[in-house]
């Protein structure tokens, strides 16, 4: 996964999903940043966030992308400069 933050300028971080847990009223995604620093990141999704994410995934363009990613495993993804 690739991450960007306005606080880091144009720095792009590379990360891996480490775990997903349900805690109280949230689903917590844990990620390990591997480049250029070694950080652990937590993202807490509440019900409202999960609804938005769920419906965004079900949009035909996004769903088709996910289905293709599950069927055809590419090792090297294309690099997009402006994501």
Image (spheres, grey):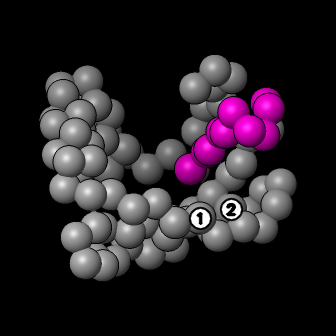
In this view, the residue in front, 52 or 76, is 52
Quarter of the image for residue 80 reads: top right
Identify the residue under disc 1: 41
Determine if the magenta segment contains residue 72.
no
Closer to the N terminus: mark 2 or mark 1? 2
> Is residue 57 shown above or below 48?
above
Q: Is residue 49 left or right of residue 72?
A: left
Determine if the magenta segment contains residue 7.
yes
In this view, the residue in front, 14 or 28, is 28
Point 26% across, 24% down: residue: 61
Q: In the rendering, at what x and y percent does residue 29 appear?
A: 42, 66
Q: In the rendering, at what x and y percent does residue 74 appear?
A: 50, 45
The local secondary structure at tag 2 comes to strand
Residue 63 shows in this picture: no
Q: In the rendering, at what x and y percent does residue 68 appear?
A: 31, 39
The local secondary structure at tag 1 comes to strand
Point 61% across, 45% down: residue: 2
Point 78% across, 56% down: residue: 35
Q: How crowded is mark 2: few (under 14 residues within 10 Å), some or many (20 or more)?
A: many
Q: Which corner quadrant holds the C terminus?
A: top right
Quarter of the image for residue 81 reads: top right
> Is residue 24 shown above or below 73?
below
Write the start and end of the magenta stretch as one range.
1-10
Foreground disc of the pair 2, 1: 1
Q: Residues within 10 Å of mark 1 (few under 14, many from 20)?
A: some
Labelled pair 2, 1 in contact (Cβ < 8 Å)? yes
> Is residue 18 shown above or below 41?
below
Point 71% across, 48% down: residue: 13
In this view, the residue in front, 58 or 74, is 58
Q: In this view, does 65 lie to the left or right of 81?
A: left
Residue 37 shows in this picture: yes
Mark sitting on residue 33 = 2
């Amino acid at each position: 996964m690739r991450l960007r933050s306005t606080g880091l300028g144009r720095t792009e971080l590379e990360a891996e999903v480490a775990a997903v847990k349900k805690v109280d009223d949230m689903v917590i995604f844990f990620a390990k940043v591997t480049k250029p620093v070694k950080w652990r990141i937590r993202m807490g999704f509440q019900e409202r966030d999960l609804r938005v994410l769920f419906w965004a995934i079900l949009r035909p363009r996004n769903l088709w992308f996910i289905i293709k990613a599950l069927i055809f495993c590419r090792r090297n993804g294309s690099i997009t400069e402006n994501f």
